[in-house]
Image: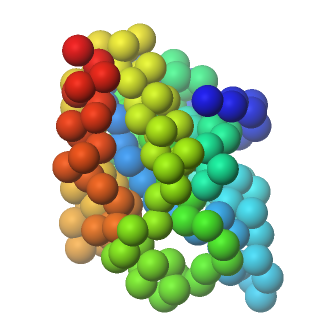
Amino acid sequence: MKIVHLYNPYGAAHQTPTKIVIHAMAEYVFFEDKYIHAPEFLKTQSYSVHAIAAPDGTVYRCRNDDEGAYHARGFNAGTLGIEVLLSGKHNNTSFEQHIKTPYITDAQYTATVEQCREWMHLHNITEIVRHSDLSPGRKVDPGNGFPWKQFLFDLRRHYE
């Protein structure tokens, strides 16, 4: 797994992680009449996440595990968040349509499993949830195109 450190300053100074939240967002987000790369978009909105899994399998580490991140309104405390990037440029409509069908690359899937497994091991975490589980009706990510059941199976299989 290739790791790139791309620090984002937005988030609480300290936390003890007990849960992992899986997100999805567009690799390039349409914002203010232009497309902006996801990590920069998060900063422009004063949002953050602990890690971002790119389609090529690179993991961008944006916050330290013991720091909070602004990634799941109402559920930021004690959670580690990872964004799985949907390849390409999307607005909200195209993003929501594309996450209904398989979108995660093999390299990205492997990197996401490895990052989550590392967190599970380091912090003794057993609870992994989707963003949509925390905010049903408001959030739809990571969507039906994310292989959720297989992902949980692979996490547990590799973790044991």
Identify which residue is drawn at 29% across, 43% down: 151
Q: Which of these two is toward me, 75 or 24? A: 24
Residue closest to the far front: 106
Residue 52 appears left or right of 155: right
Identify which residue is drawn at 37% across, 75% down: 101
* Quadrant of the drawing holding the N terminus: top right
Above or below for 1 versus 104: above
Residue 29 appears left or right of 108: right
Identify which residue is drawn at 46% across, 46% down: 109
Q: Quadrant of residue 127?
A: top left
Q: Which of these two is toward me, 123 or 48? A: 123
Q: Position of residue 17 (x, y in %)?
A: 38, 23
Q: Quadrant of residue 156?
A: top left
Q: Position of residue 131 (x, y in %)?
A: 33, 55
Count of number-bearing discs: 0
Above or below for 14 versus 69: above
